[in-house]
Image (cartoon, rainbow, N blue to C red):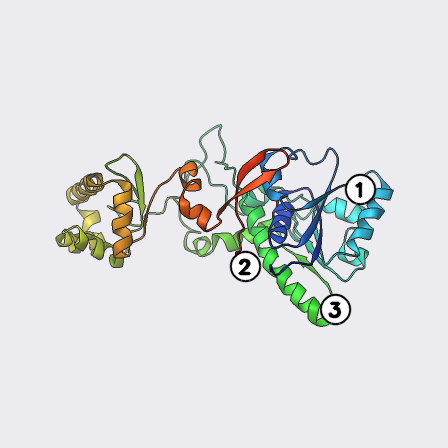
Amino acid sequence: MSFLEGYKVVEISRYPAGSILGMMLADEKAEVTKILFPNINPEKESVEFSVWNRGKNILNANIFDDSTELERVLALCTTADIIILCLDPKEIDKYSLTYDSLKGEGVVVSLPCFLPGHTLDYLPPEEEIGAASAGIYSLNPAGKLPVPGEGPSFHSLYYSSSFAAMTASSAVVGALLQKNMTGLGQQISVSLHDSMYQGMGGNLIRHSKRSEGRQIAHPVIGRAYQCKDNKWININMSHPRFLEPFLKSINKLEWFDELNDLDSLLENENALNLYKEKFELLWRENTAKEWEDKLGDIGVPGSVSRTVDEWIDEEQSYLSESIINVEDPYFGKMKQPGKLIQSL
């Protein structure tokens, strides 16, 4: 039995953060009803819509233009244990979709872009706004000023929305525990902007003054090397506790002292270039999978750099349910990322 089975959720959201949170709760067997707004959910026939709204009941309700349908949704909210709100701030106020206005005993989860009181609290919880405001969109090239005419380097991953949803999910469980003990609901607010600080973690502090975006761990040893089969291996070997056992395993332990003396290496350009060449040739001696197995045997972090399709087709991806097969009403049988949490 999943720990949210039996709980009722009403999701009033037209941005990814709310949909992702609703998906996570539905994955744990909560009964999630998503309010779908006509002509406002352009992603309805997209892959994202299919993933984020799996396992939900879909209720079409034009709450922004029809007062009867708004009342219908508000009545539904009074029966819900959890209400997810991820709308434009002006819509929440205009249609009385606030904790105080709902007057229920449920847990209301708001996912704004910025918390009330922030100078930008009027902006909608768009992924691009939340991520860019927290600095997750890097400049191009890394750490430098943008290439003239190109601007920042954007990506398609929903970082700020996902972190907000994950942060809110644990808060929801805590609020439900309190509700079970006291009978009282509460308002939870998790902003996309603030959630990114959790995602960045220690890097936010360590690299806040760094002029370059590229992390330089070792002057010789890189993070990725091309192997005998032309595939790439990604490694983490800058620390002596990984470097020493690796060199010992390939009978090159005599390299250790010189490679570990970073100051001397940086002052000796010839030695620096020589070791760089040695490392390039070294990884060409075996296939990427052979290196991955060898590194695993000696406890050194390293992995074959797989394509997305290669990762999806890995047997372990299915055994761990990181990838699941879903029968989608629009796309038919499709592969989707699995549950973030595995409850036993």
Which residue is disc 1 drawn over? 63
C-alpha separation, residue under disc 1 versus residue under disc 3: 29 Å
> What's the residue at 65%, 51% (across, down)?
111
Residue 180 spot, x, y in % from top left: 70, 68
Within the image, what quadrant is residue 177 found in? Answer: bottom right
Looking at this view, name the residue that lies furthest to the top.
149
Image position of 293 with respect to 170: above or below: above
Question: Measured along the vertical axis of the image, is residue 327 above or below residue 97?
Answer: above
Dot 1, crowdedness within 10 Å: few (<14), some or many (≥20)? many
Q: Residues within 10 Å of mark 2 (few under 14, many from 20)?
A: few
Q: Check the picture and name the quadrant holding the N terminus.
A: bottom right
Q: Is residue 325 visible?
A: yes
Q: Residue 183 sits in which quadrant?
A: bottom right
Question: Which circle, 2 or 3, is nearer the viewer?
Answer: 2
Q: Nearer the viewer, residue 279 or 143?
A: 279
Mark closer to the chain start, 2 or 3 = 3
Residue holding disc 2: 343
Name the amino acid type tagged 2.
Ser
Q: Identify which residue, 200 or 340, lies in the foreground.
A: 340
Q: Secondary structure at mark 1?
A: loop
Q: Amino acid at mark 3?
A: Gly
Asked if the residue under mark 2 is in contact with the one under mark 1, i.e. CB atoms within 8 Å, the reply is: no
Identify the residue position indicated by label 3 in the image. 183
